[in-house]
């Protein structure tokens, strides 16, 4: 009897100890931090339908002098990916940690000088988190993200595409009754029919100027925020001068994309005779935090 009591006492004494050690989470994976320019084809890949038969540096062209990347295609609108070559860790199975991220980039939708009408053109550009770096068979209507069902904007065949994107949409196809007026920003979670979207502003003020975009994801609160800033010709992106344009609570990245995902841009690039898209800079970084719902 005494032995049983002693054994129980020892077991009970050990409980707090176990509980305590279980409370110490393992350390999270290292953070990622990337920054451009310089834009280099050693770290970034320009990818599109190979049947187009053009070299990558024609579609994702370096400016002269170098500094910016210019997206366009002479013959036809096509879907293009311009992503970081190495996949980035965003969450880890069994870990209490998940990655929050911040990304920012400056773009210009630069109309061709011969176009007298100042309006948006091309299909737009999305910041995209994808399972592959390959544009696959996705058509221009989905910014090169994945093939969609025209009637719904959902992935063709009901696939789970493990894709999350923030789209800046500049093309309105009247067959897509679900798509809001352009230009708009939208959050796409496994569908280009955005879970949240908001009209940006009138086309004439949108084209031919530098626009900085700031996207922040909080893995602890499951919140995504998108900010915009009109940047003057010689100005710099500055988040404290930007305006919060879209926010969404309820994005669980760990449930929506692969642990290791590709980050960067997916676009339906314009035809050169309409104009080009300039990419001036891009920064992306992660910070591992204790995730929402983690027991620690
Ligand atoms: C990378 O860019 C350089 C300079 O523009 C070019 O010579 C080279 O062919 C490119 N490589 C690839 C793999 O695209
Ligand atoms: C950018 O400028 C346009 C035109 O003046 C304005 O309508 C829009 O609200 C501005 N956007 C931001 C983010 O300040
Ligand atoms: C960003 O804008 C804020 C507010 O206008 C200003 O105080 C700050 O100096 C700016 N930062 C940079 C790096 O220019």
Image (cartoon, rainbow, N blue to C red):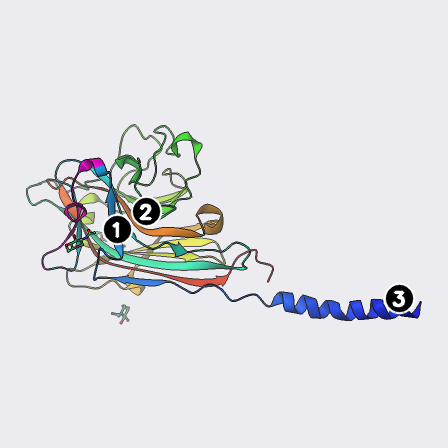
Disc 1 target residue: 45
Pointer 1 or 3: first along the chain = 3
Residue at (45% x, 52% y) in the render: 259
| Residue 166 in sight in this render | yes
Circle 2 is placed at which residue position? 133
Distance CA(mark 2)–CA(mark 1): 8 Å
Q: Identify the mark nearer the N-term, 2 or 1.
A: 1
Q: Which residues are magenta?
A: 51-65
Left/right of residue 134 with respect to residue 75 in the rendered view:
right
Beta carbon of the mark 1 residue lies under 8 A of ligand 1: no
Residue that label 3 marks? 4
Q: Quadrant of the C terminus?
A: bottom right
CA gap, disc 3 and disc 2: 62 Å
Instruction: Answer above or below: position of 203 versus 177.
Output: below
- Residue pictured at 12% horizontal, 42% vertical: 272
Residue 164 as seen in the image, left or right of residue 46: right
Disc 2 + disc 1, Cβ < 8 Å: yes
């Amino acid at each position: 009897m005494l032995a049983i009591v002693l054994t129980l006492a020892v077991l009970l004494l050990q409980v707090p100890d176990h509980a305590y050690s279980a409370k110490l989470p393992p350390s999270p994976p290292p953070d990622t931090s990337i920054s451009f320019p310089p834009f280099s084809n050693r770290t970034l890949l320009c990818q599109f339908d190979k049947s187009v038969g053009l070299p990558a540096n024609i579609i994702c062209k370096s400016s002269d002098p170098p500094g910016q990347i210019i997206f366009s295609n002479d013959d036809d609108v096509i879907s293009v990916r311009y992503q970081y070559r190495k996949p980035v860790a965003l969450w880890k199975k069994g870990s209490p940690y998940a990655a929050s991220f911040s990304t920012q980039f400056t773009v210009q939708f630069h109309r061709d000088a011969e176009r007298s009408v100042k309006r948006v053109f091309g299909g737009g550009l999305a910041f995209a988190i994808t399972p592959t770096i390959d544009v696959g068979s996705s058509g221009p209507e989905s910014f090169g993200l994945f093939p969609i069902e025209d009637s719904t904007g959902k992935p063709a065949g009901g696939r789970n595409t493990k894709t999350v994107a923030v789209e800046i949409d500049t093309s309105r196809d009247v067959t897509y009754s679900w798509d809001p007026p352009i230009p708009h920003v939208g959050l796409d979670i496994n569908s280009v029919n955005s879970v949240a979207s908001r009209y940006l502003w009138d086309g004439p003020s949108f084209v031919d100027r530098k626009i900085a975009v700031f996207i922040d994801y909080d893995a602890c609160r499951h919140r995504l925020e998108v900010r915009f800033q009109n940047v003057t010709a010689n100005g710099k992106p500055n988040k404290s001068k930007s305006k919060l344009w879209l926010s969404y609570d309820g994005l669980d990245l760990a449930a929506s994309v692969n642990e290791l995902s590709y980050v960067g841009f997916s676009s339906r690039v314009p035809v050169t005779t309409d104009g080009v898209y300039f990419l001036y800079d891009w920064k992306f970084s992660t910070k591992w935090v204790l995730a929402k719902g983690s027991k620690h």
